[in-house]
Image (spheres, rainbow, N blue to C red):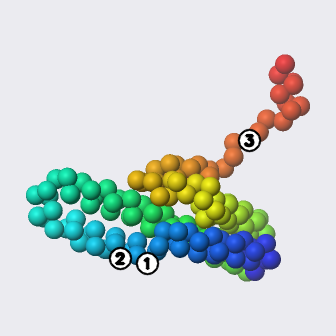
Amino acid sequence: MRADAEHLKAQIAESLSLLRAHLDWDRALRRLEELNAKAEDPSLWDKPAEAQAVMRERGRLADQVEGVKRLEAEVRDSLELIELAEAEGDSAAADAAVADLARLAEVTEQLASGRISALVSSRSMPELRTWFERSKEPEPPQESALASHAHD
């Protein structure tokens, strides 16, 4: 695999490790299982305030866990695409996959460094999801300075 991809892979692995530690991953997974079990208990709804609190915490933890899992899956997909593209000699596809990997490295580094950790530890992660989805969209083409002066 290309050196730049190997470097990004290592950077992402380190960031994901820090993010998992920040979330106390094993405890979060156990707690999510507990909350899922509580949510399935029909008697929970006899106490609406408790049920709301359980569902809020469950939603927050599920968003966090799924967010990390989604990032990990995208990293795996990008790495596989790089390997396939290199095996086929498709440098354009390999370059695009490395660019995706670079974007994922930026996302995971920002999350792990705490620049947007408030989003991760907030009630839910809609802001993160919106930002993450926007980061995957291609940049709109920029009009060149010469072209913009031609319209003047």
Q: Position of residue 39 (x, y in %)?
A: 22, 65
**Badge 3: residue crowd in 10 Å (few <14, some 14–19, many ≥20):** few
Q: Earlier in the sequence, mark 3 or mark 1?
A: 1
For the C terminus, which image quadrant? top right
Q: Which of 70/1 is in front?
A: 70
Callout 1, which amino acid? Asp
Q: Against 4, is 50 above or below?
A: above
Count up the numbered dots: 3
Counting from the top left corner in percent of width and height, residue 34 is at: 28, 73
Name the residue at 31% across, 56% down: 56
Q: What is the C-alpha distance between the residues marked 3 and 1? A: 43 Å
Q: Which residue is mark 2?
A: 30
Q: Viewer-proximal residue, 120 or 62?
A: 120
* x and y percentages locating residue 98 in the rendered image: 72, 67
Give the residue at mark 1: 26
- Can you tell which of label 3 and label 1 is closer to the viewer? 1
Which SS class for mark 3?
A: loop
* Disc 3 versus disc 2: nearer the observer: 2
Mark 1–mark 2 contact, CB under 8 Å? yes
Quadrant where the N terminus lies?
Answer: bottom right
Please name the residue shown 79% across and 35% down the image: 143
Looking at the picture, tell me which residue is in the foreground, 64 or 140.
Answer: 64
Residue 46 visible: yes
Kindly tell me whether residue 73 is visible in this rendering.
no
**Residue 141 marker:** 3
Q: Residues within 10 Å of mark 2 (few under 14, many from 20)?
A: few
- Vertically, is 139 above or below 115? above
Q: Secondary structure at mark 2?
A: helix
Name the kind of residue labelled 2 in the image.
Answer: Arg
Q: CA distance from mark 1 to mark 2?
A: 6 Å
Query: 116 left or right of 56?
Result: right
